[in-house]
Amino acid sequence: MGDLTVNEAVAGYALRTPATLVDSCVLIDVLADDAEWASWSLDQLEKQASAGPLVINPLILAELAARYERAADLEAALAGLPLLREPLPWDAAFLAGQAFRVYRLAAGVKTSPMPDFYIGAHALVRGMRLLTRDVRRYRNYFPKLYIVGPMA
């Protein structure tokens, strides 16, 4: 994991501009105008944007891409949102692997790390908040992660 430990990643949170990594479920709510969640997700995007940058990574973009036939259509849909793109940090790979290890020890059936493990690890390593509706899943594997979500 290089020179960065989990504790240093968490401690560094207070020293950085508070960015928010936006989980794909929140963006899907807004882009699909989900009847149940669009309003909540849009309100949270606006609230988090007023506190700092909103960020996505390649995995989040990939999860969104499944809903579009052309890359240009996806780009057009995202154009109205103030999203910064950040690559996955190398240090996040180790944390994602550790989360996957915990998952497998708890009888998880997937055979390779799931995108959520990389997304949670990315937010933790970079000291970002995570905006998601999947609070329980992230809390289980990243208990020190600052999560913004329903009843978080």
Image: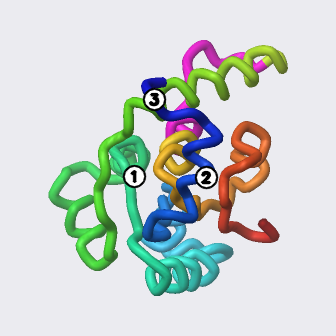
- Three-letter amino acid code at disc 1? Leu
Q: Over which residues does the magenta segment extend?
A: 108-119
Q: Which of marks 3 and 1 is nearer the N terminus?
A: 3
How busy is the neighbourhood of tag 2: few (under 14 within 10 Å), some, or many (20 plus)? few
113 within the magenta span: yes
115 within the magenta span: yes
How busy is the neighbourhood of tag 1: few (under 14 within 10 Å), some, or many (20 plus)? some
Give the color scheme: rainbow, by chain, secondary structure or one colour: rainbow
Q: In this view, does 65 lie above or below 38?
A: above
Element carrying mark 2: helix
Q: x, y percentage for residue 127?
A: 52, 55
Estimate the spatial distance between the alpha carbons at disc 3 and disc 1, rounded to whole Å.
33 Å
Q: Is residue 61 above or below residue 84?
A: above
Q: In the picture provided, is 135 more to the left or to the right than 86?
A: right
Q: Residue 11: give its label.
A: 2
Q: x, y percentage for residue 79?
A: 24, 73
Residue at the location (64% across, 73% down)?
A: 37
Q: Earlier in the sequence, mark 2 or mark 1?
A: 2
Residue at the location (42% across, 49% down)?
A: 60
Q: In the picture provided, is 127 more to the left or to the right than 106?
A: left
- Mark 1 lies on residue: 64
Q: In the picture provided, is 45 more to the left or to the right than 148?
A: left
- Mark 3 lies on residue: 3
Residue placed most toward the observer, 97 or 116: 97
Residue placed most toward the observer, 89 or 34: 89
Element carrying mark 1: helix
Q: Earlier in the sequence, mark 3 or mark 2?
A: 3
Q: x, y percentage for residue 101?
A: 69, 18
Q: Residue 46: give its label.
A: none
